[in-house]
Image (cartoon, rainbow, N blue to C red):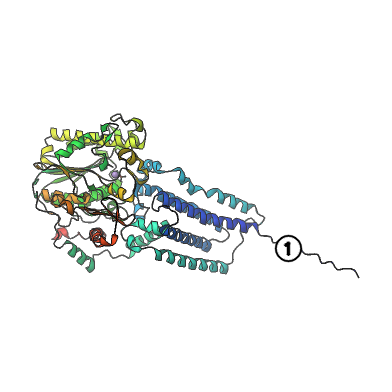
Amino acid sequence: MGKIIVQPKSVRITIDPSYIIEFFLWITFILGMLLKCAHFQFSTELNEKPYFNTINNNMFLATFTSLLLITVFVLLFFNRKRLLALFIADILVSILLLADTLYFRYYYNAITIPVLYQIGLMSSITESARSLFKTGDLIFAVTIPLYIAGLSMLKKLPSSGLARINPLKRIIMVVIIICVCFGLFQYASGKSSPGVFTYDNNNVISNLGIFYFHYLDIKTQVHEKFFADHTLNKVEKNELDTFYSGRTAVGDKYKGIAKGKNLIIVQMEAIQQFVINTKFNGQDITPNLNKFINDSTYLENFYYQVGEGNTSDAEFLTNNSLYPLRDGAVYFKYPENTYESLPRLLKQQGYASYAFHAYKPSFWNRTQMYKAVGFDKFVSAGDYILDDLLGWGLSDKSFFRQSLPKIDSSKPFYSFFITLSSHHPYNSFTDYKGFDVGKYQGTMTGNYVKAANYVDQAIGELFDDLKNRGLYDNSIIIIYGDHHAVLKDQTDILKDLIGFNFTEYNWTKIHKTPCFIRIPGMTEKGVNSTICGQIDLLPTVANIMGINAPHALGKDIFNTSLENGYAVLRDSSVITYKYTYVSEDNTVYGNDGQTLDMSLYEGDIRKYQKELEISDIILQKNALQHINDK
Ligand code: GP9
Ligand code: MN
């Protein structure tokens, strides 16, 4: 009998190569996106190293959850073409992240739906955006070649693509992923403290990631647009009544000392306080403004309080003494509201009011908003002869020179000037010869110093012109800057200029612009150290002009003692004489920069932050619409 030889059958498991490619591309999507999100979160300094601490872990987990939800969407709506859909989703989301990154570096906010109203402004800031692009941002394109390789390999397979997944399997996958997402997100959100979200969008992003923030923003905007009640309800009315009862924005000291005088306000583009009395390459950057300190009241602790509306927010704060919005610009969102504005208050006293700005009148929706604010006349780009161009358009020197003759000074007037030449990224000053910046020639630091010096010269010429026209001594003259000059990731400029060392505390304390108030007949001049901000200008002016401003949220600076000074920033940071609350890291600091026990200050901080809530109610509910009926 012959032997039976059992030959072992060779077991060969063959995996369809399309599975491998598919697996590889899903992993590319998830890991690639996590990497891109990490780049956004850390390069904007929303999150800080070490990469894996409690806040960052939560953020990564929440971001991972959001990515899984995007895959659900792809799986649900696409079958054989699911990888192509994934590729397109990757491109779209990467574009959004790049836009968020660049936008954030300029405005310290991610893009929100209201920002899309401002889309028309984008062409003007492309130069700024370009200056903000970093080589590392190429990471947003890094996955593209991988998809192209994967998809073309897939096409070359005999099956020429992916196998269909039957509907039941797809639904089961989708349900499982959604359950996982829900569990993970609950875990991540349970670990973060929602209290810090109340006033600051950036805390939402650093704790729960950029995708969750976008979801929240869309949800809020949809609710506001379609479901929110826009009439002032009883609770809100009571809240406003309680807030205003017994509160007077204006005081008694210096009451009416400048009654009947003209009012001239100059808002300077991007001039921060640190240029004042600062020398660079052996010369004063702002000699005229330095001299003006002794001819005016110089507010050395004057904070800018703008939000996403930037320049327009600064204008808004000054002319209305209300806070800007947490999302978007008031100029775009509420140009139909009624305001108790400076032009309107002065109109009741027989003043004519002018706004001067030599740029497109539609920019920041000024034409529309100035009607609501009540300016009688808006003089914009088309009203000037473009005889001297610098940066975005007409130079500030020519702007002032051409503006003054447009004022009818035979009757009392209020003129509001908004300068433009010193706009970020200051490139147009490379060839400016008025100030030698030595080795900084051609750098952003050098260009900013030149820009600030140029504005100072333009102001010097304005003073001469006002004197020649006999307006200098019968006008209140106020000069201040609109907002930051230096972006958070360009703080090298500050290091070069003033040896600035970046900490969240130092960054908050540098949110200052110089502010000068020259009042004819006022003998008390020089430095005033009271902590204050742009919101305080209206009540301060109202007091010296002898008028009342019952709904102003600011305070009258001349009637506020050093100890009672404060400023609330739109990101909900609070600066007082005793402490500084920095919303970015939710920490209270003493004046030496040391951390203090938050629990001791919480009540006080909330009291100041209440002003933001009141302002939001006034804007959202158009609560001042009946002020003229009384
Ligand atoms: C343009 C100018 C610039 O009119 O006010 O606005 P900004 O970019 O600084 O907000
Ligand atoms: Mn500006």
Label 1 packing within 10 angstroms: few (<14), some (14-19), many (20+): few
Horizontally, residue 414 falls left or right of residue 384, namely left
Q: Residue 341 location, x and y as percent? A: 18, 52
Total count of labels: 1
The residue at 40%/66% (across/down) is 190
Which amino acid, by three-letter code, is at mark 1?
Val
- Residue nearest the viewer, comparing 379 with 587: 587
Secondary structure, mark 1, is loop
Q: Residue 145 location, x and y as percent? A: 55, 48
The residue at 38%/59% (across/down) is 218
Placement of the N terminus among the 4 image quadrants: bottom right
Q: Say if 330 sits above or below 5 in the image.
A: above
Cβ(mark 1) to ligand 1 < 8 Å?
Answer: no
Say which residue label 1 marks.
Answer: 11
Horizontally, residue 336 falls left or right of residue 171, namely left
Q: Say if 393 sits above or below 151 in the image.
A: above
Placement of the C terminus among the 4 image quadrants: bottom left
Residue 183 in view: yes
Q: Residue 523 location, x and y as percent? A: 9, 42
The residue at 13%/34% (across/down) is 467
Q: Residue 549 location, x and y as percent? A: 14, 54
Residue 574 in view: no
- Residue nearest the viewer, comparing 388 with 578: 578
Q: Residue furthest bottom?
A: 1
Q: Quadrant of ligand 2?
A: top left
- Residue nearest the viewer, comparing 22 with 75: 22
Q: Say if 313 sits above or below 630 in the image.
A: above
